[in-house]
Amino acid sequence: MRYHDTTMIYLKLILAIIVRTIADVSFKAAVHRLDFDSFSTLGTNVKRLVQSPFLWMGGAFGVVNVILWTSCLETFDLSYAYPFLSLSYITIMISGKVFFGETLDWHKMVGICFIGLGACALFLG
């Protein structure tokens, strides 16, 4: 396989991680200010959710993610692709901090390090 082909294959996997992150962050943005704890506000919240552009953006990126992911699975072994996709957990946690002010305590940071080390071990192995 030529260098260019290898680069394109890995770019596809990286793009799948980015698209998955955008989809999940979009879904979070769609429900960020909604309160589903009360049954009395359920109808209002569902209406606001359906009208949210973030819900539709998340759905669209979700469809793109399925297409990209199946393309990645065509190329990579499951034992490689799924652990590498775990890098999306890192990008999603960081996105939660950046966009929604979520906490990144030391437990999450340790988890991020282990996920990153595992992905590096697969990539280098």
Image (cartoon, rainbow, N blue to C red):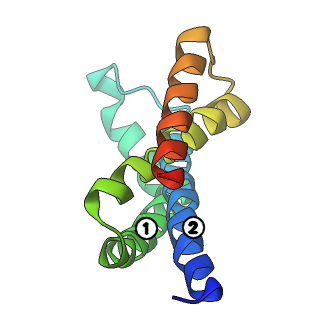
- Disc ID at residue 15: 2
| Residue 93: x %, y % from top left | 57, 33
At 52% from the left and 57% from the top, the residue drawn is 17
What amino acid does circle 1 point to? Answer: Asn
Name which of mark 2 and mark 1 comes first in the sequence.
Answer: 2
Front-most of 26 and 35?
26
Q: Can you name the residue that lies furthest to the right here?
A: 98
Would you say residue 22 is visible in this rendering? yes
What amino acid does circle 2 point to? Answer: Leu
Marks 2 & 1, CB-CB < 8 Å contact:
no
Residue under pointer 1: 65
Neighbours of disc 2 within 10 Å: few (<14), some (14-19), many (20+): some
Front-most of 85 and 77?
77
Residue 37 location, quadrant: top left
Would you say residue 30 is visible in this rendering? no
At 38% from the left and 69% from the top, the residue drawn is 69
Front-most of 124 and 52?
124
Separation (CA) of disc 2 from disc 1: 9 Å
SS state under label 2: helix
Q: In the shown orientation, is residue 114 left or right of residue 94?
A: left
| Residue 62: x %, y % from top left | 41, 64
Above-or-below relation of 43 to 108: below
| Residue 102: x %, y % from top left | 62, 22
- Number of labels in the image equals 2
Above-or-below relation of 71 to 66: below
SS state under label 1: helix
At 57% from the left and 87% from the top, the residue drawn is 5
Residue 44 location, quadrant: top left
Q: Can you name the residue that lies furthest to the front here?
A: 125
- Disc ID at residue 93: none
